[in-house]
Amino acid sequence: MIFWWSTVIDHAVPLRTMNAMTLDKWVPFRNEGPVVRCRLFCFPHAGGNATFYRPLRNFMPPDVDFCPLELPGRAARLDEPPFTSMSALMEPLDRALQPLMGVPFGFFGHSVGACMAFEAARQLRSVDGRIAVHLFVSGRGSPKFAPADPPQARPPSDQDLLAILGRFGGTPAAVMQRPELIAALLPALRADLALVAGYAIDPGDHIACPITGFAGADDVAHPGSLQAWRDFTRGKFRTCIFPGGHFYFSPAAGALAGEIIEDLYASVGMHAPDARP
């Protein structure tokens, strides 16, 4: 499901200020410079980390900075407690991402990360008040509305979490066969599931930007539930279904990147590279 042990950073010049150190923790893979015309911040699946999304980043054109986010409790942040509350996550994330919001920005989220991305699009603003230009959700249905009396869910056991890993796939066999790696993975997985289980929004909490929904045709999470995202935006909405299961984009990263680029360029008012004069 993840490759949590990699901590490679691919921006060329190490920055030494406290703000840069914060950015390095939250956004380990990024570009900085005048060539960047828009950014897309990527939220991971449950227990996932930034390294998992580097193949997708590699398909982006130079003017689109695809930035996988590194949440606490994994990879180089393994010693930090993971968040179990959406509101608690958004506050430090807002501060961390501000230096990168000087260009038009959007959000992408896969699986439980789709709910994180939606809440980021709902809450986060640039210093001058600009909102996200586009939201991309993948492999998950829309958030639920807040009930008057929220049910109390039983925390999942380690066996429950292992069953989830087996059900959705994506975890390398080399990880599943090593108890010490699984032991390091489970706290972040449990925290992410708790975070999204406790997340609900009030009816009418829409966002203004367009939403694009992606899913694998054979996803056990039921790609048909993507249609429910239509009710959460006042902008345009469309879906795109790919062959494959929950982690459909592992073999289809190039095709997925193409769909993202097309919609992102349209929302920003940019022209695709092959359409430029």
Image: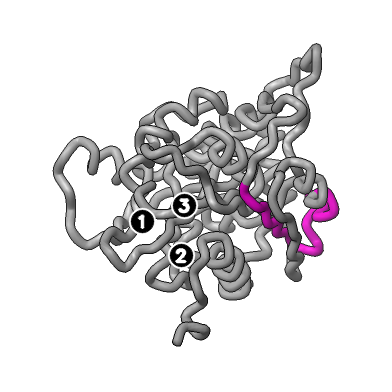
Q: Position of residue 240 (x, y in %)?
A: 74, 65
Q: Earlier in the sequence, mark 1 or mark 2?
A: 1
Kind of residue indicated by mark 1: Phe
Do the residues under discs 1 and 2 have CB atoms within 8 angstroms? yes
Of all residues, the one furthest to the left in this rendering is 16
Q: Residue at x 73, y 55 (%)?
A: 237
The picture places residue 223, in percent across and down from the top left corner, at 80, 55
Q: In terms of image quadrants, where is residue 249?
A: bottom right
Distance between mark 1 and mark 3 Cα atoms: 16 Å
Q: Disc 1 designates what residue?
A: 29
| Vertical placement of residue 255 versus 115, above or below | below
Q: Measuring from the top left, give residue 253's x and y in whole percent.
A: 58, 70
* Image side of residue 176 versus residue 128, left or right: right
Observer-nearest residue: 145 or 177?
A: 145
The reply to whether discs 3 and 2 touch (Cβ–Cβ < 8 Å) is no
Which span is picked out in magenta? 209-225
Amino acid carrying label 3: it is: Phe
Given the image, on which type of amino acid does mark 2 rest? Arg
Instruction: Kindly identify the residue that appears in the image at 50 percent across and 75 percent down.
Output: 271
Q: Which residue does the numbered mark 3 point to in the structure image?
A: 105
